[in-house]
Image (cartoon, rainbow, N blue to C red):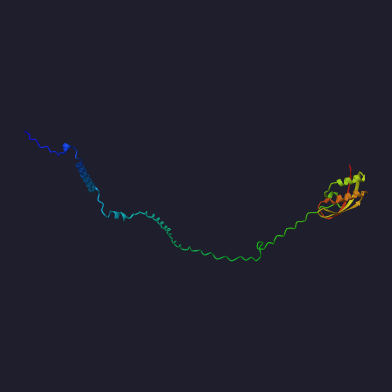
Amino acid sequence: MTPRLPIDKNDDRAVGLNWPRIAGMSFVIAVHAAALMLLLAPVTPPGAEKQEEDVTRVTFIEPPPPPPPPPPPPKEPPKEIKLTPTPTPPTPTPTPPPPEPPVVLDQPTPMSTQAAPPAPPAPTPPPAVPSRNTSDLRASICSKPSMAPLIVALQKSGASTADLSLHLVFTADGSVTSVSVVKSSRDRDLDRAAQSWARAVKLCPGAPGDGILPFSFSLD
């Protein structure tokens, strides 16, 4: 027969959960867990903070660019090679023959006589002065004015024709300097008109002098 064990009246399983024990076990487990975490945490040495304070920040400064390379030295100019010419022996100069004695001629030749200088050219004669017929100067007139004043004076006189002669004094260029009536037309106004007309007459150039200018005109 199996003996029966005595039943403990204080057994918790028979009664239910023991909360004080559970709380004590939880506290013990929490303490152990905290201790384990402290053991696992890295240990910081006491001088670590000071080392962090004494850290010197080093900034690297880029070195300056290297200086440019010096220019290459100038090239030396090529040396001139001087060639010393070999002296050439002098060529002997032939001795000229002695000069022949001059030939003396007793009589001078035409070549030895100096030619006479040419005679100067004859002066150009002045141009021939055209001769004038001083008894009738009508052929010597080069230019004459209009006959209109004479025609008007003839119309005023009432005549149809007029004959008169004038005495002219003229210079070498043909200008008339003086006029006088030699033969009148018997009309004073017509004579004066003829004198004014004759002063404007231009004779051809020639010798100065005087002469007679006869002329007649009519209304036809």
Q: Left of 183 or right of it: where is 204? A: left
Q: Residue at x 87, y 47 (%)?
A: 149
Q: Left of 32 or right of it: where is 130? A: right
Q: Can you name the residue that lies furthest to the right here?
A: 186
Quarter where residue 116 is shown: bottom right
Q: Residue at x 88, y 45 (%)?
A: 152
All told, the count of numbered labels is 0
Residue 170 horizontal/vertical position (percent): 84, 54
Locate the N terminus by quadrant: top left
Please state which of residues 35 and 1 is positioned toward the viewer in this rendering. 1
- Depicted 16 relative to depicted 211: above or below: above
Locate the C terminus by quadrant: top right
- Depicted 15 relative to depicted 85: above or below: above
Q: Can you name the residue that lies furthest to the top here?
A: 1
Residue 27 visible to an observer of this rendering = yes
Residue 67 horizontal/vertical position (percent): 40, 56
Please state which of residues 216 and 44 is positioned toward the viewer in this rendering. 44
- Depicted 171 relative to depicted 1: above or below: below
Residue 100 horizontal/vertical position (percent): 57, 65
- Depicted 55 relative to depicted 28: above or below: below
